[in-house]
């Protein structure tokens, strides 16, 4: 119930977001008409259309996005005709073609028929057209709802959350419409300016149509809007759900069932060894698109074994740092009844490539069974919300313990020992594995991490400071920021920024980031044709020397040979603020996300 209230409030705050500006003229064009017969049907049509299209887009894939684009252009034409009829009343009388007649009917009937107590359907249809064009800025609240929908699949809850968001927007717009109607009525009575007001609204509608057609609602206004409303929305989320005591590196958290990468688990996320009540039955392992290192495993076949299920994805730094312990447990206890199963649930699209996962498991030395959960079937069966996440199953097929995030490895191993002792009927040695990991798998220096995981694609990008902001899904030239504050970053060169990454179109492009951490990692990929991309890393304008990461040399030189996480910086001395820069010598580089340790 709390999440529905949060979604509703997120919608209410759209009235102060610049992203609402292009559709305001469509709404206020009804301000001088009866609210119940004109304004309310328009807002209902807008809310229902947005909720329906957003639900389909979140779970239905690219075909929905393409279909919606056709609908948007039809709506643009329709509302442009509506604006013209407001600006030039004689225009409607001269239109004879079917489409124009429809636009005329919507504009004229919505204005005249509803005022006389007639049908509400013309206004409702105008609301549908407005709903197709409305592109609210995806701040923290809408972002977590949409991400949860994509991971959890289609559901009534998804649609109702989006409808609550749309209802909040309709509420604030409705109040503005009621107030605006009274103002317009007073102006018409006192100034006798009804015709001029009508024409001004026509100009405003056409301006709104032009802004949407030019993409201003999804580019410039989005950047302005997020700067003004994101902190307010985040405050609401923090009030609805207290901040965890550990560091959660993704903003899309468990309220929407979305995935979050975790540095360490908070106490409520684990049980104490020795106190392992039954938490439920072993959820189903059905739904994997492929199994690696093993034929498909079932719950029935695993009965009598102690099972550790590890949810991971191969470019997740938190998963990589937990992996040495999971490998060690699999080796140490495999002859005593432990079966480790890695469930690979992708975060980025390239992690759905089975060839990439096969290569990663080989490179990372993962020899235990891995279920490739590209459709999130096992993820949903467990109700999982985090990478990494460990679930411990006893020999009777009962879920006895869980742990989310990094850390507490000795406690997790003692859980394994206790469950094996129960299975085998004898006590287990209490010694625990000692791991000495290197590269990206080495444990983080959390006392010195002051930079958050940062995504490059526009869906979740934060603190981007190149002049002009990000341009969505189109090639654009970027300039490096003149100065970077801590955790600010920017692009230079010609890039195409998509929802989850930025792709370099021409050689010589760069990314700069002001950070504070011992380690800096960047998830990168080569060009679309797989051709390697050469790059050089600089720290404060100089080669990193002794502070270079595992994937570059002391001069900062490296090569992107595959889609994975690259360790680019490991400071050897005292950890301080630094400006990181990566310069790409070849085109085609794809950058996804920064992580720190």
Image (cartoon, grey):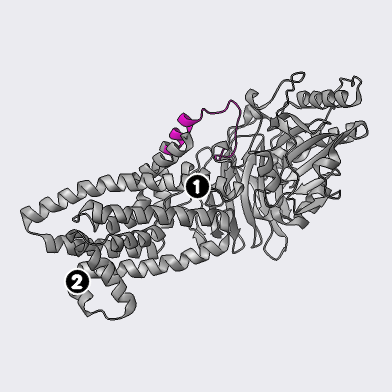
Q: Which mark is residue 407?
A: none
Seen in the picture, residue 247 relative to 130 is either above or below; the reply is above
Q: Position of residue 444 (x, y in %)?
A: 70, 32
Graded by Cα atoms within 10 Å as few (under 14), some (14 to 19) or many (20 or more), the crowding at tag 2 reads some
Q: Is residue 168 left or right of residue 259?
A: left
Q: Does the magenta segment cover residue 569?
A: no
In percent of the image, x 56 and y 52: which residue is there? 457
The relative height of residue 291 versus residue 588 in the rendered view (above or below) is above
Residue of label 2: 88
The CA distance from mark 2 to mark 1 is 43 Å
Q: Which residues are magenta?
A: 233-253
Q: Which one is closest to the eye, mark 2 or mark 1?
A: 2
Give residue 464's mark: 1
Q: Nearer the viewer, residue 550 or 284?
A: 284
- Residue at 19% across / 71% down in the picture? 88
Residue pictured at 86% horizontal, 27% vertical? 420
Q: Secondary structure at mark 1?
A: loop
> Residue 288: x percent and y percent?
75, 50
Disc 2 on helix, strand or loop?
loop
Q: Residue at x 65, y 48 (%)?
A: 347
Q: Quadrant of the C terminus?
A: top right
* Viewer can see residue 541: no
Residue nearer the viewer, 286 or 492: 286
1 vs 204, left or right, is right
Residue 427 in the image: state x and y as whole percent.
90, 19
The answer to whether residue 249 is magenta is yes
Q: Is residue 212 left or right of residue 261?
A: left
Q: Residues within 10 Å of mark 1 (few under 14, many from 20)?
A: many
């Amino acid at each position: 119930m709390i999440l529905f209230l949060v979604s509703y409030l997120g919608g209410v705050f759209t009235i102060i977001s610049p992203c609402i500006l292009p559709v305001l003229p469509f709404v206020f064009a009804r301000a001088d008409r009866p609210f119940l017969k004109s304004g309310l049907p328009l807002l209902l049509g807008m809310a229902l259309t947005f909720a329906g299209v957003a639900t389909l887009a979140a779970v239905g894939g690219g075909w929905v996005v393409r279909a919606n684009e056709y609908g948007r252009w039809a709506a643009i034409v329709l509302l442009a005709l509506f604006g013209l009829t407001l600006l030039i009343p004689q225009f409607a009388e001269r239109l004879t073609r079917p489409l124009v007649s429809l636009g005329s009917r919507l504009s004229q009937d919505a204005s005249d028929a509803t005022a006389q107590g007639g049908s509400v359907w013309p206004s409702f249809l105008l609301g549908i057209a407005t709903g197709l064009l409305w592109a609210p800025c995806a701040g923290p609240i809408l972002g977590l709802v949409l991400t949860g929908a994509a991971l959890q699949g289609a559901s009534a809850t998804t649609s109702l959350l989006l409808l609550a968001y749309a209802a909040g927007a309709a509420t604030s717009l409705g109040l503005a419409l009621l107030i605006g109607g009274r103002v317009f009525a007073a102006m018409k009575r006192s100034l006798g300016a009804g015709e001029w007001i009508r024409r001004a609204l026509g100009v405003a509608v056409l301006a709104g149509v032009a802004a949407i057609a030019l993409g201003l609602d999804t580019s410039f206004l989005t950047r302005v809007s997020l700067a003004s409303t994101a902190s307010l929305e985040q405050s609401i989320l923090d009030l609805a759900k207290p901040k965890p005591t550990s560091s959660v590196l993704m903003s899309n958290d468990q309220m929407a069932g979305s995935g979050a990468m975790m540095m360490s688990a908070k106490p409520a996320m684990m049980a104490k060894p020795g106190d392992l009540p039954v938490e439920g039955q072993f959820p189903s392992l059905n739904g994997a698109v492929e199994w690696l290192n093993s034929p498909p495993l079932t719950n029935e076949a695993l009965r009598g074994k102690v099972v550790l299920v590890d949810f991971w994805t191969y470019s997740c730094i938190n998963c990589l740092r937990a992996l040495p312990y999971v490998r060690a447990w699999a080796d140490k206890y495999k002859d005593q009844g432990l079966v480790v199963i890695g469930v690979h649930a992708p975060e980025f699209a390239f992690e759905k490539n089975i060839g990439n996962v096969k290569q990663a498991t080989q490179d990372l030395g993962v020899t235990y069974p891995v279920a490739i959960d590209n459709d999130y079937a096992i993820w949903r069966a467990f109700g999982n919300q985090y990478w990494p996440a460990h679930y411990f199953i006893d020999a009777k097929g009962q879920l006895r313990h869980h742990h989310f995030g990094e850390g507490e490895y000795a406690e997790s191993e003692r859980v394994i020992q206790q469950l094996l002792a129960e299975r085998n009927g004898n006590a287990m040695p209490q010694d625990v594995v000692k791991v000495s990991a290197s590269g990206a798998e080495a444990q983080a220096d959390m006392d010195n991490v002051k930079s958050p995981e940062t995504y490059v694609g526009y869906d979740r990008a934060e603190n981007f400071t190149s002049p002009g902001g990000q341009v969505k899904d189109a090639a654009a030239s970027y300039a490096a920021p003149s100065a970077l504050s801590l955790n600010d970053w920017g692009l230079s060169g010609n890039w195409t920024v998509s929802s989850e990454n930025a792709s370099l179109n021409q050689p010589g492009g760069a990314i700069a980031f002001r950070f504070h951490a011992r380690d800096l990692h960047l998830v990168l990929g080569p060009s679309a044709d797989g051709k390697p991309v050469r790059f050089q890393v600089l720290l404060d304008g100089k080669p990193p020397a002794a502070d270079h990461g595992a994937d570059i040399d002391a001069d900062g030189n490296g090569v992107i040979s595959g889609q994975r996480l690259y360790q680019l910086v490991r400071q050897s001395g005292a950890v301080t603020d630094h400006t990181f820069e990566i310069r790409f010598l070849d085109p085609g580089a794809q950058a996804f996300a920064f992580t720190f340790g």
